C-alpha cells in the first residue's frame, strides 16, 4: 500500500510518538507501505535543529532492517498528489493509498476527507487514520462473524470507499432473503461515504432455482437496481452494475466483497438474516482483511484480476446482455 506524506504531516507523525498506537502504526508503515514524501529529502536539513534531529532519527528507524520485500519503501519529491486535490482523476493504486496532507496545501482538504471516499489525514489525524487499517494487536485479518448480529454492526469494520465489488452466487436466490440483506449490507459498506458517489458492482448468477416451485427464475434487476440506488444517503449517489455469470466461473471467489482499503470473505452467502432478523446463515466465518498487509493486498488484486477476466470473457463471447445497468467502476473495465 502507498502513503503520501507532506512535510508538516511528517513532523506531526513524529510528534505523536506518545500515542498508544504509535508503535504499531510505525511497524505497519515500515513493513508494508511504500512511503512517498511530497518534498525533497534535503528539505529536512532546513528544519530547526531539534526537528531535524527528530526527523533524521525517525527516518533511520523506518529504513533500517526493513523486510527484503519492502527494501525500497521510501520515495522523495513526489509530485503526486497535486493541489488542490482532484480526487475524480485518481486511478488504480491512487484510490487505495493513504494521504497525510497539510491543510495549507488545499483549503478543501477537510471537505475531501469528510466525503469518506479516501483515507485522508490532516495534521494531527495521522495516527487515528493509520490505526483504522488494522484490528486488535496489529492483526490485518479478523474473523468478525460473532460480532455481526445485524448488518448495522458491520459499520465498525468498514473504511472509506469509492467502489464496492461483491461476488456472491446466491445473493439474489430468494426474494425474501435478499430484501433483508443486500440493501442493509450495502448501506453498512457505504456508511463512511457522505455527499459523494460510490460504484457498486455485483457478480452473481443470472438465474436461480426456486425449491418451492421447482422452477428457475431471473431476479427483477430493474427493481433491485432502483432499490440499491435508494440506499444512498442524501446528497450521495450510487452507480450500480450487475455481472451475471456461471456457477463454475464465480466459484473460486464466491462470497467476497472488495472495497478500497478492506475486503471481506464469508463462509456462506451474505443472506445472513431472515425477515424476522434471525441469523440463519450456515457459515461460521466472516473475515475482514485489511489491504495494509502485503498478502491481503495481493489477494485483493488477484480478486480484481479474476473479476476482470469474467468481464473480458463475456465481451469475447459477445454476451454483453450479461452485464446490466451502469457499467461504471474504478477498478474494472466494462465494454460499452
Image (spheres, helix red, strand yellow):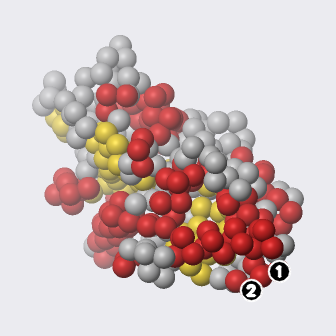
Q: Which residue is mark 1?
A: 46
Query: Quick check: 207 above or below 15?
Result: above
The front one of 251 and 11 is 11
Horizontally, residue 197 falls left or right of residue 92, namely right
Q: Residue at x 16, y 24 (%)?
A: 212
Q: CA distance from mark 1 to mark 2?
A: 7 Å
Q: Which residue is mark 2?
A: 42
Residue 104, position as x, y percentages in the image: 86, 63
Residue 236, position as x, y percentages in the image: 67, 43
Q: Residue at x 32, y 17 (%)?
A: 278
Q: In terms of image quadrants, where is residue 52?
A: bottom right
Q: Residue at x 74, y 86 (%)?
A: 42
Callout 1 crowding tier (Cα within 10 Å): few <14, some 14–19, many ≥20: few
Q: Secondary structure at mark 2?
A: helix
Residue 36, position as x, y percentages in the image: 61, 75
Residue 204, position as x, y percentages in the image: 31, 49
Amino acid at each position: 500500500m502507498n502513503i503520501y506524506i507532506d512535510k508538516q504531516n511528517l513532523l506531526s507523525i513524529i510528534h505523536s510518538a506518545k500515542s498508544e498506537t504509535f508503535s504499531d502504526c510505525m511497524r505497519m508503515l515500515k513493513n508494508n507501505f511504500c512511503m512517498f514524501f511530497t518534498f525533497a529529502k534535503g528539505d529536512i536539513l532546513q528544519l530547526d535543529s531539534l526537528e531535524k534531529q527528530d526527523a533524521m532519527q525517525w527516518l533511520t528507524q523506518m529504513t533500517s532492517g526493513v523486510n527484503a520485500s519492502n527494501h525500497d519503501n521510501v520515495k522523495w519529491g513526489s509530485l503526486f498528489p497535486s493541489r488542490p486535490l482532484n480526487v475524480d482523476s485518481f486511478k488504480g493504486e491512487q484510490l487505495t493509498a493513504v494521504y497525510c496532507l497539510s491543510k495549507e496545501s488545499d483549503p478543501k482538504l477537510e471537505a475531501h476527507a469528510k466525503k469518506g471516499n479516501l483515507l485522508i489525514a490532516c495534521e494531527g489525524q495521522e495516527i487515528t487514520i493509520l490505526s483504522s487499517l488494522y484490528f486488535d494487536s496489529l492483526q490485518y485479518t479478523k474473523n468478525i462473524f460473532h460480532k455481526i448480529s445485524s448488518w448495522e454492526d458491520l459499520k465498525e469494520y468498514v473504511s472509506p470507499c469509492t467502489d464496492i465489488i461483491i461476488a456472491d452466487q446466491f445473493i439474489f436466490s430468494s426474494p425474501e432473503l435478499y430484501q433483508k440483506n443486500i440493501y442493509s449490507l450495502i448501506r453498512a459498506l457505504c456508511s463512511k461515504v457522505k455527499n459523494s458517489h460510490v460504484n457498486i458492482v455485483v457478480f452473481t448468477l443470472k438465474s436461480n432455482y426456486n425449491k418451492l416451485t421447482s422452477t428457475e427464475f431471473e431476479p427483477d434487476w430493474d427493481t433491485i437496481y432502483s432499490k440499491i440506488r435508494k440506499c444512498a444517503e442524501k446528497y450521495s449517489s450510487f452507480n450500480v452494475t450487475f455481472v451475471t455469470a456461471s456457477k463454475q466461473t464465480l466459484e473460486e471467489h464466491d462470497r467476497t466483497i472488495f472495497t478500497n482499503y478492506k475486503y471481506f470473505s464469508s463462509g456462506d452467502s451474505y443472506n445472513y438474516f431472515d425477515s424476522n432478523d434471525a441469523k440463519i446463515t450456515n457459515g461460521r466465518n466472516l473475515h475482514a482483511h485489511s489491504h495494509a498487509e502485503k498478502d491481503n493486498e495481493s489477494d485483493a488484486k488477484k480478486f480484481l484480476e479474476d473479476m476482470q477476466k469474467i468481464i473480458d470473457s463475456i465481451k469475447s463471447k459477445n454476451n454483453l446482455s450479461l452485464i446490466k445497468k451502469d457499467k461504471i467502476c474504478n477498478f474494472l473495465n466494462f465494454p460499452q
